[in-house]
Amino acid sequence: MIVLVFAMVCGVYICSICLKQISTHSKAGYLHVQVIQKPCPEPQIEPWEIPYVHYPKPKTYSRAECACNPVRYFAILSMQRSGSGWFETLLNNHTNISSNGEIFSVKVRRSNTSTIGETLDKIYRLDWLSSASKNECTAAVGLKWMLNQGLMQHHADIVEYFNTRGVSVIFLFRRNLLRRMISVLANSYDRDVKLLNGTHKSHVHSPHEAEILANYKPIINATLLIPNLKQVEETTAKALEYFKSTRHIILYYEDVVKNHTLIDVQHFLKVPLRELKSRQVKIHKGSLSSQIKNWDDVQKTLKGTHFENFLHSDYRK
């Protein structure tokens, strides 16, 4: 009996030792190794540029080998029919620039400052996916924002967001507001009539389509002409005043038409210089007298005012 009890005690002891060894090996097999990400090296930039250099971390994908490529944030502030669509296609022709269009044309996105902030966060985090997205190796990311899309209404909060997050502003306006008015009226007419085979197009890619749209000559209300031009001028001045504390550059459509290499803009966004091209075709060309049905009335109304210079051509393209 003594021998039997001794054998049983020894067996239990040996089994307990084996179980401990098995448990130790199992834990070793599932050892968690944490990889510590190496911080990105400091870029060789001026001290004032530091707030405008970012290393976004998207939630929907990894930037992989481009994680340490710095990204600049920008916003194009403009008005409808000021050449912003064409301007944006030039920017997106650059391999390192992603401009995501009129994000805030959808009203729910601009309903309040919270939804505006959430939308901007998603864009600048590189999580906004669009046809313009270069994603991993983007060096500059932004959007096109019209002044009447909540921008003026919430300007104080938006300026604070831009300055806090290091967003640079690109203003794009037209000097000749009369030409802009023609474009606005023609675009509004085509939205209803749909001249191109029942399809409305704000921008075209062929001379034939441009010629069809240019055949329409709007009648301008001569009584409201000067008040409307003054209103656009005042809105532009307010926008420049509201956002003067941001890092910004002011461009005019007429200058971009003459020189669409956008060297100043590429320097402003700190991207490598590239030759930029667009497939869009200009719709309204030539003298204003051939584009307005009641040209004589418009001419009489503007003569003697500070808007008289709008009657003359200001670019050739």
Image: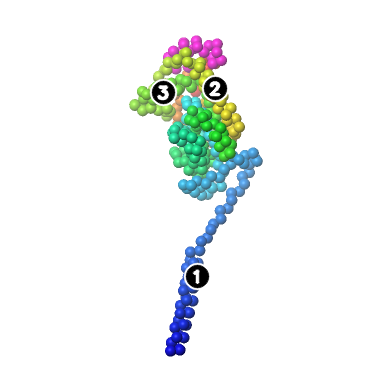
- Secondary-structure class at tag 2: helix
Give the residue displayed 55% in from the left and 29% down from the top.
Answer: 171
Mark 1 Cα shell of 10 Å, populated few (<14), some (14-19), many (≥20): few
- Secondary-structure class at tag 1: helix
Q: Is residue 38 magenta?
A: no
**Where residue 236 sits in the image (x, y, percent)?**
54, 25
Q: Is residue 302 magenta?
A: yes
Give the residue displayed 62% in from the left and 41% down from the top.
Answer: 50
Amino acid at circle 2: Glu
Q: Which residue is mark 3?
A: 188
Numbered label attached to residue 24: 1
Report the front residue among 198 and 145: 145
Q: Which residue is mark 2?
A: 234
**Where residue 263 sits in the image (x, y, percent)?**
57, 32
Give the residue displayed 58% in from the left and 39% down from the top.
Answer: 164
Q: Which residues are magenta?
A: 287-308
